[in-house]
Image (tube, grey):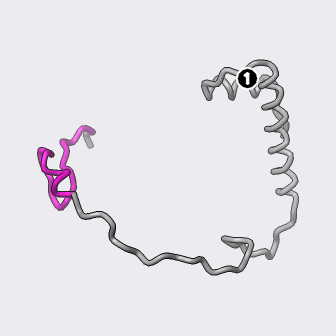
Amino acid sequence: MSLTLTDVEKIAKLSRLSLNEQEKAATLDKLNAVFAMVEKMQSVNTDGVEPMSHPHDVALRLRADQVTETDHAAEYQACAPEVRDRLYIVPQVIEE
């Protein structure tokens, strides 16, 4: 798949970006390079390859969970018109 300058202009408009002609051309080149890489990756045969979360077989160093903040839920919900089971109760706005 290859993009055209018109495609870049549409994407820029949807993204609310103001690009000059030089930026449009550079963006076109970069996007086409990304699509070319994706096409190349899709052509690789991955049958029998199990997905993995990380390319290296390493153990993550995790820190112990520590409570650093106190529970302020009651304080935050004190100004709410109605609270039940720590949930804000609001009027129904969509009819069934």
Q: Residue at x 85, y 34 (%)?
A: 29
Write down the residue under mark 1: 9
**At which x and y percent is residue 47?**
82, 72
Q: Which residues are magenta?
A: 73-94
Residue at 83% across, 56% down: 42
* Position above or below: 33 against 12: below
Q: Picture quarter containing residue 50?
A: bottom right
Tell me the crowding category of disc 1: few under 14, some 14 to 19, or many 20 or more residues within 10 angstroms, Cα based. some
Q: Quadrant of the C terminus?
A: top left
The reply to whether the magenta stretch includes residue 62 is: no
The secondary structure type at the circle numbered 1 is helix
Q: Taking 52 as reference, is 8 above or below it?
A: above
Q: How many callouts does the rendering have?
A: 1
Image-quadrant location for residue 6: top right
Image coordinates for residue 82, horizontal then vertical, percent: 12, 49
Image height check: is 59 above or below 77? below
Left or right for 25, reference 74: right
Across and down, in percent, residue 32 comes to 83, 38
Query: What quarter of the picture does the N terminus occupy?
Result: top right
- Residue occupying the far front of the picture: 68
Which quadrant would residue 12 be assigned to in this image?
A: top right
> Measured from the top left, where is residue 13 in percent x and y?
65, 23
Residue drawn at (78%, 32%), measured in percent from left and top?
27
Question: Looking at this view, is 62 or 20 the one in front?
Answer: 62
In the image, residue 86 lies in the stretch drawn in magenta: yes
In the depicted structure, whether residue 70 falls above or below residue 28: below
Q: Amino acid at mark 1?
A: Glu
